[in-house]
Image (spheres, grey):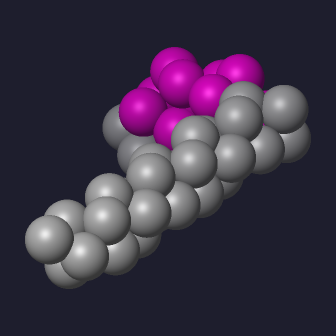
Amino acid sequence: MTILLYLLIISLTFGALGLVVFLWSLRSGQYDDLDGAANRILFDKD
């Protein structure tokens, strides 16, 4: 029965860590320019 408690704590920790990383990526601007990278590979700078 104690293994379920350990697994619950580990899963909640991983979930919270994933949420923190996702919120950090939102605040750092990772999703601001979604079309820029898609257009950059289509057009050559030369």
Where is residue 26 drawn, in percent x and y?
Answer: 72, 31
Residue 44 appears in the rendering: no
Query: Is 35 or 4 nearer to us in this picture?
Result: 4
Tell me where residue 23 sits by quadrant.
Answer: top right
Instruction: Report the front residue among 24 and 20.
Output: 20
Estimate the x, y position of residue 7 in percent, counting from the top left: 27, 69
Q: Residue at x 20, y 78 (%)?
A: 3
Q: Is residue 30 above or below residue 34?
A: below
Quick check: is 37 in the magenta stretch? yes
Which image quadrant: the N terminus? bottom left
- What residue sits 68% from the left and 47% below the top? 20
- Per the rendered image, the range of residues in magenta is 29-40
Q: Nearer the viewer, residue 22 or 30?
A: 22
The structure residue drawn at horizontal position 57% and vertical position 48%, both measured from the top left corner, is: 16
Q: Is residue 16 magenta?
A: no
Taking 29 as reference, is 40 left or right? left
Q: Residue 34 versus residue 23: which sits nearer the camera?
A: 23
Horizontally, residue 8 falls left or right of residue 20, namely left
Q: Position of residue 46 (x, y in %)?
A: 60, 55
Q: Quadrant of residue 11?
A: bottom left
Residue 4, located in which quarter of the rendered image? Answer: bottom left
In percent of width and height, residue 13 lies at 52, 61
Q: Is residue 3 above or below residue 39?
A: below
26 vs 27, left or right, is: left
How many numbered circles are shown? Answer: 0
Q: Is residue 28 visible?
A: yes
